[in-house]
Amino acid sequence: MSTIDRQYQLVSQPIITEKGSTDTAKRNAFHFRVPPDASKIEIRAAVEKVFNVKVKKVNTLRAAQKVRRRGYSVGTTPAWKRAMVVLEEGQVIDVL
């Protein structure tokens, strides 16, 4: 996978929730669902390149796998990571 494909993969799933909208209004932070192996440096570079904005800081949160049952079969939900990208003042992502 090329680096350009990886950058678009990192920012392809924005998370639009009530909590995320409040966070956007308070501290100009946008939330994305990223692969569990993504690093903060990689996320920062991807957002700056794809949306042409300046990133102030990146916070990440890991969502653990949960055990789910359907009848007798037992499985797990996939693990994922949330990236909260805080932009510099005056910067905005118009796509969201």
Image (cartoon, rainbow, N blue to C red):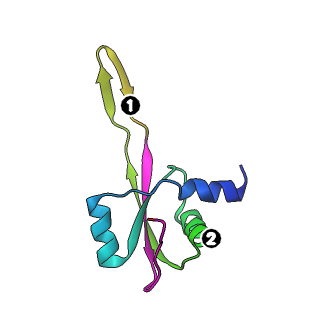
Q: Quadrant of residue 77?
A: top left
Residue picked out by circle 1: 76
Label 1 crowd bin: few (<14), some (14–19), many (20+), radius 10 Å: few
Residue 84 placement, left or right of 23 = right
What is the CA distance from the residue labelled 2 to the residue labelled 1?
34 Å
Q: Amino acid at mark 2?
A: Lys
Q: Residue furthest top?
A: 72
The image position of residue 1, as x and y in percent, is 71, 49
Q: State which region is magenta.
A: 79-95
Query: Of 66 and 88, which appears nearest the observer?
Result: 88
Secondary structure of the residue carrying numbered label 1: strand
Which dot marks residue 49? 2
Kindly identify the residue that appears in the image at 54 percent across and 64 percent down: 43
Residue 25 colored in magenta in the image: no
For residue 35, the mark is: none
Secondary element type, mark 2: helix
Q: Describe residue 48's horizontal placement relative to residue 77 as left or right.
A: right
Q: Is residue 52 left or right of residue 83?
A: right
Residue 20 in the image: state x and y as whole percent. 32, 63
**Location of residue 90 in the rendering, given as x and y in whole percent from the top left corner:** 44, 86
Considering the image in quadrants, where does the C terminus appear?
Answer: bottom left
Residue at 33% x, 36% y: name it.
66
Foreground mark, 2 or 1, reads: 2
Q: Is residue 92 magenta?
A: yes
Inspect the image, locate mark 1, and give the three-letter code of the amino acid beneath it.
Answer: Thr
Q: Nearer the viewer, residue 18 or 33?
A: 18
Pointers 2 and 1 in contact (C-beta within 8 Å): no
